[in-house]
Image (spheres, rainbow, N blue to C red):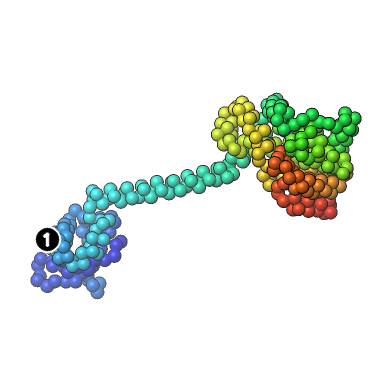
Amino acid sequence: MSAGVPATLYDGRTSRPQPVTLRFAGDGTLTIETPEGGPVVAFHRAQVRVESRLGDGPRFVRLPDDQRCEVTDNDSLDAALRHWSAPGLGAWLHRVEQSWRLVLVSAVVLLVLGWVAIAHGVPWGAKHVAFMLPAGLLRTLGDQTLQTFDKTVFKPSQLDAERRRELQAKFTAFLNAAGDRDTYRIEFRASPRLGANAFALPSGVIVITDELVKLAESDEEIIAVVAHECGHVQRRHIMRSVLQNSAIVVVMTLVTGDVSSVTALGGAVPALLLQSRFSREFEAEADAHAIELLQRAGLPTGHLASMLERLESSHRADEDDDGGLMDYIASHPPTRERVKAIRDADRDR
Ligand SMILES: [Zn+2]
């Protein structure tokens, strides 16, 4: 019910004008109220004719039986008529306005849903797809990546064969003691360009640089780094990171169940490892995995903490370091925070 429009009623029978209030309702009725609880009458839109406005002069609302109401407040009358008098244009405009509101609301809802889908759906889908990938595909992607790096940033390891065999045997013993039954393969490479570094490929190959072996003060520190890399392998962090940047592949794979389109992303794996780092969340997961393996194997978690600190100061000291590439594990999140969490893991046992 709209606000009332003051008017003067001439009833066509008596000459006495009567003050009234006109109420134009959205359902097309016009109700005429008299003051002090006098009689109330109602008319339908079809029975009423409102004169056109001519400047600011008074105009009449004409009713059946020669009754008419004189209105001087033209603005109030126009406002009241906007949703009442023109069954054609007014109602149509009203509907359009309503539907525009609907379109706007729908657009906002879609935007919010889109944002939620991107913020949560893509990482969720990427994780799902990463765990759908068969071992053969992961092996192919891992081999391709290693070949690419062998042509670019790696040189053959200078460690003697005896030392490599010794470390291999220690990793195997460690994984057996920790009860980790996933398949890993350790590869040694030299890389003056990348310095002390370690990283895991999707296939379960864990590459350790000669520089890292030399930087470590004990073999347990190297083992602790390998344990961290095992975490990245087991949680499929590389493929999840690559897939998170390819929402279309994630959606296609989830819809069709066909993982072959993921092969097309193979080229993104070396780039991911070289140019970006894992998210804070993934590093924390890998640290947690390392802590679990170390504890199960009966090794102090402090080995990982001290190796992280050593890696950080080595990369800080190296002026030519091109930004600590690969899984420069001491880079992110801030080492101090992680080191504390890792040391506390043992203290809280
Ligand atoms: Zn890492």
Q: How many labels does the image show?
A: 1
Residue for badge 1 = 65
Q: 252 left or right of 87?
A: right
Specify the quadrant of the image occupied by residue 9: bottom left
View extreme (bottom): residue: 36
> Quarter of the image containing the N terminus?
bottom left
Disc 1: CA contacts within 10 A as few (<14), some (14-19) or many (>=20): few
Mark 1 residue CB less than 8 A from any atom of ligand 1: no
Q: What element carries label 1?
A: loop
Tell me, yes or no, if residue 184 can be seen here. no
Q: In the image shown, does 227 or 23 lie closer to the viewer?
A: 227
Q: 277 left or right of 103?
A: right
* Residue depicted at 16% across the width and 58% down the height: 52
Q: Is residue 246 above or below residue 280?
A: above
x, y percentage for residue 67?
Answer: 13, 63
Q: In the image shown, does 345 or 45 lie closer to the viewer?
A: 345
View extreme (front): residue: 319
Q: In the image shown, does 167 or 258 lie closer to the viewer?
A: 167
Tell me, yes or no, if residue 16 can be seen here. yes
Specify the quadrant of the image occupied by residue 247: top right
* Residue depicted at 58% across the width and 41% down the height: 121
x, y percentage for residue 143?
Answer: 71, 27
Q: In this view, does 270 lie above or below 317?
A: above
x, y percentage for residue 48?
Answer: 17, 57
* Residue depicted at 26% across the width and 57% down the height: 82
Q: In the image shown, does 126 or 324 lie closer to the viewer?
A: 324
Name the amino acid type tagged 1. Asp
